[in-house]
Image (cartoon, rainbow, N blue to C red):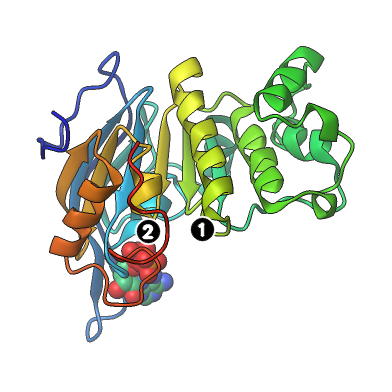
Amino acid sequence: MNGTPSPHGYAGHDGYEVVKLDSVRKVYGGSKNQVAALDGVTIGLPRGSFTAVMGPSGSGKSTFLHCAAGLDRPTSGTVLLDGVDLSPLGEKDLTKLRRERIGFIFQAFNLLPALNVVDNVTLPLRLAGRRAKRAEIDEVIDRVGLSDRRGNRPGELSGGQQQRVAIARALITKPAVVFADEPTGALDTYTAREVLTLLREAVQWSGQTIVMVTHDPVAAAHADRVLFLADGRIVSSLDRATADQVAERMTHLGAWGNGHPAAPGASHGRGASR
Ligand SMILES: Nc1ncnc2c1ncn2[C@@H]1O[C@H](COP(=O)(O)OP(=O)(O)OP(=O)(O)O)[C@@H](O)[C@H]1O
């Protein structure tokens, strides 16, 4: 299956689809300047799978992530998250569902500067009114390699360390799915690789489901499957692809002109494979 396109109804480890989008459309703008940011997306993401979402600028990646994570509402179609239909939920229930069942990782880390590592990591538990168990906190902080940084604040940590705090914070609630939006966008190649390895390990060791939007073929090559968006539609996918295969597919989509940091030939470590 290496590098070959396949139907979008990918069956994962146990076949249960944690995230399901059915005919999702998201239209922005008024009657004169309408943009279909998502134009009929149907996809199921299996439990314990790592999915990367790629596509040219403006292809709908962020809109896909926002609709799938209940941060934005589709104009039509349905989103099921861990079996829950998001469409009838009010803001309060959506917030609760996001808090309890979703972990988020952002390009800009989004840590609270006044809190130390332990307090940043355990914040989602406290927000959900849950008590943090010492052993669970120790385990997740240990897993991201920050045991000796527990008392440090974000300002005292490197970018890679801050993103590892964010990963621990996303994993602490044992969410049904983690959505990562350009998680390596602010990191150098070496640190990015460490962060991607951690995400891969979370899938491997705990069966975590992860969905990651990225512009970087090297990052996408860490995923089980890469979905390619163009003009709001999923136009193709690759399973267990190398960075070169991902980059080639992006080139076919006309994804980047000269000078894009991830463009073929740019010095971005792109040639490295999984
Ligand atoms: N709030 C909004 N209002 C109007 N149009 C929007 C809005 N958000 C997104 N769009 C439009 O929808 C389309 C998809 O945008 P989206 O941000 O999802 O793309 P993207 O693939 O994430 O792009 P990029 O890689 O540049 O971040 C674009 O044409 C964009 O201009």
Give left or right: position of 195 versus 142: left
Q: Position of residue 212 (x, y in %)?
A: 41, 45
- Locate the C terminus by quadrant: top left
On residue 215, the disc is 2
Identified by mark 1, the residue type is Gly
265 and 76: which one is in front? 265
Give left or right: position of 44 versus 160: left
Identified by mark 2, the residue type is His
The answer for how far apart the CA atoms under marks 1 and 2 are is 8 Å
Residue at numbered disc 1: 185
242 and 64: which one is in front? 242
Residue at mark 2: C-beta within 8 A of ligand 1? yes
Q: Is residue 31 visible?
A: yes
Q: Where is residue 98 in the image (x, y as percent from the top left)?
A: 54, 39
Quadrant containing ligand 1: bottom left
Q: Do the residues labelled 1 and 2 touch (CB within 8 Å)?
A: yes
Q: Residue at x 73, y 35 (%)?
A: 121
Give left or right: position of 92 versus 35: right
Q: Is residue 39 visible?
A: no
68 and 55: which one is in front? 55
Q: Which residue is drawn at 40% across and 68% down?
A: 261
Q: How crowded is mark 2: few (under 14 residues within 10 Å), some or many (20 or more)?
A: many
Q: In this view, does 16 lie above or below 171?
A: above
Q: Residue at x 78, y 16 (%)?
A: 133
Residue at mark 1: C-beta within 8 A of ligand 1? no
